[in-house]
């Protein structure tokens, strides 16, 4: 329970104290930053709103104001974060009734987002042009992400002991905090902890590369400062030189998943390989690819049926 809080206090002040009491140290930094951003928006949109004045009408007005400049899903996240604090305020008798009940979440229509990825020929062109001679470099990281679909932070956290060369697997059980520089961190979610099957060529290449490396030290992190923009820049230069679409490191993850789907790999298997928390995430992310595959299936069905006559 929060102390020294009165129902006449400003709502945004209460929300900030609630964040510090219940969320600080309990959630990851990225989540904490989202809560603090939500607080800034509340302070901006309702600077004089008091706890005792938070009712269904004022709360809906706050949601509506936020929704004017945000997509519906973002507004839903805003609503959920506020709801946690408001429900506690109701339990503590600071707000009479739950004003979030039956709240209507609005928002701008999402902009059409089409993920960028390479087709099979373009990926082959890229991989053939990588500098894979000698010691580990960023081109080796590009190759590994293209072949595994790992997230950038997951690939950075790889150590020699994560490779099981005998069973051709790669263990993903941590990430590397390249943004804040705090070292190893947990994976994005429980589903992100997984074993990825790798091909024999990759096994042979990396079994030689990691020889002599410390078993528990990340193989790609050799300096204190690692930037996503550095690797994206290297990848972009490769793409431009080869006259193929310019994609990001995350685009390689999309490329990996897209090629698997086009090859007929099930959505369930792709979701597990990517470390998605559910198949729904995979379906939403690769909706346009799945629709293309469905169109191909329709053509196949029609051809099969025509052969029955």
Image (tube, rainbow, N blue to C red):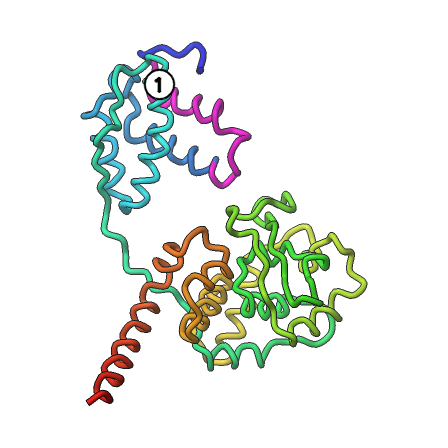
Q: Residue furthest front?
A: 308
Residue name at image x 30 percent, y 76 percent: 297
Side (left or right) of 76 relative to 254: left
Q: What segment carries the magenta color? A: 9-31
* Residue 73: image location, x then y, percent: 31, 45
Side (left or right) of 266 relative to 233: left
Q: Quadrant of the C terminus?
A: bottom left
* Residue 209: image location, x then y, percent: 73, 68
- Mark 1, Cα crowd under 10 Å, few <14 / some 14-19 / many 20+, is many
Note whether 182 is above or below 287 in the view shown: above
Residue name at image x 28 percent, y 47 percent: 71
Residue name at image x 59 percent, y 70 percent: 143
Side (left or right) of 18 relative to 167: left
* Residue 283: image location, x then y, percent: 36, 60
Residue name at image x 56 percent, y 51 percent: 193
Magenta-drawn stretch contains 21:
yes
Side (left or right) of 106 relative to 261: left
Note whether 251 is above or below 300 in the view shown: above
- Callout 1 secondary element: helix
Residue indicated by mark 1: 89
Q: Quadrant of the N terminus?
A: top left
Q: Pick whichever, 145 or 164, lies toward us.
A: 164
How many numbered tags mark residues here? Answer: 1
Magenta-drawn stretch contains 172:
no
Note whether 282 is above or below 97 in the view shown: below
* Residue 88: image location, x then y, percent: 37, 21
Q: Main secondary structure of the magenta part?
A: helix
């Amino acid at each position: 329970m929060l102390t020294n809080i009165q129902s006449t206090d400003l709502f945004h002040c209460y929300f900030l104290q609630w964040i510090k009491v219940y969320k600080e140290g309990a959630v990851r930094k990225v989540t904490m930053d989202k809560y603090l951003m939500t607080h800034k928006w509340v302070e901006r949109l309702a600077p004089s709103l008091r706890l005792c004045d938070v009712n269904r009408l004022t709360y809906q007005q706050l949601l509506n104001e936020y929704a004017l400049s945000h997509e519906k899903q973002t507004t839903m996240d805003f609503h959920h974060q506020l709801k946690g604090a408001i429900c506690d305020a109701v339990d503590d008798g600071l707000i009479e009734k739950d004003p979030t009940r039956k709240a209507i979440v609005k928002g701008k229509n999402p902009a059409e987002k089409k993920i960028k990825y390479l087709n099979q020929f373009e990926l082959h062109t890229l991989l053939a042009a990588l500098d894979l001679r000698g010691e580990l470099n960023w081109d080796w990281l590009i190759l590994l992400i293209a072949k595994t679909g790992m997230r950038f932070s997951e690939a950075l956290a790889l150590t020699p002991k994560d490779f099981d060369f005998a069973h051709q697997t790669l263990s993903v059980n941590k990430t590397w905090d390249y943004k804040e520089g705090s070292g190893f961190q947990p994976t994005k979610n429980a589903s992100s902890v997984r074993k990825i099957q790798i091909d024999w060529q990759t096994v042979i290449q990396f079994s030689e590369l990691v020889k002599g490396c410390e078993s528990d030290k990340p193989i790609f992190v050799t300096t204190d400062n690692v930037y996503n923009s550095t690797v994206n820049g290297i990848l972009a230069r490769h793409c431009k030189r080869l006259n193929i679409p310019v994609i990001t490191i995350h685009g390689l993850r999309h490329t990996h998943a897209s090629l698997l789907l086009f090859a007929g790999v099930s959505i369930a298997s792709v979701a597990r390989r990517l470390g998605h928390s559910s198949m729904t995430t995979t379906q939403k992310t690769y909706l346009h690819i799945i629709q293309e595959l469905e169109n191909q299936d329709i053509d196949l069905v029609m051809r099969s049926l025509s052969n029955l006559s």
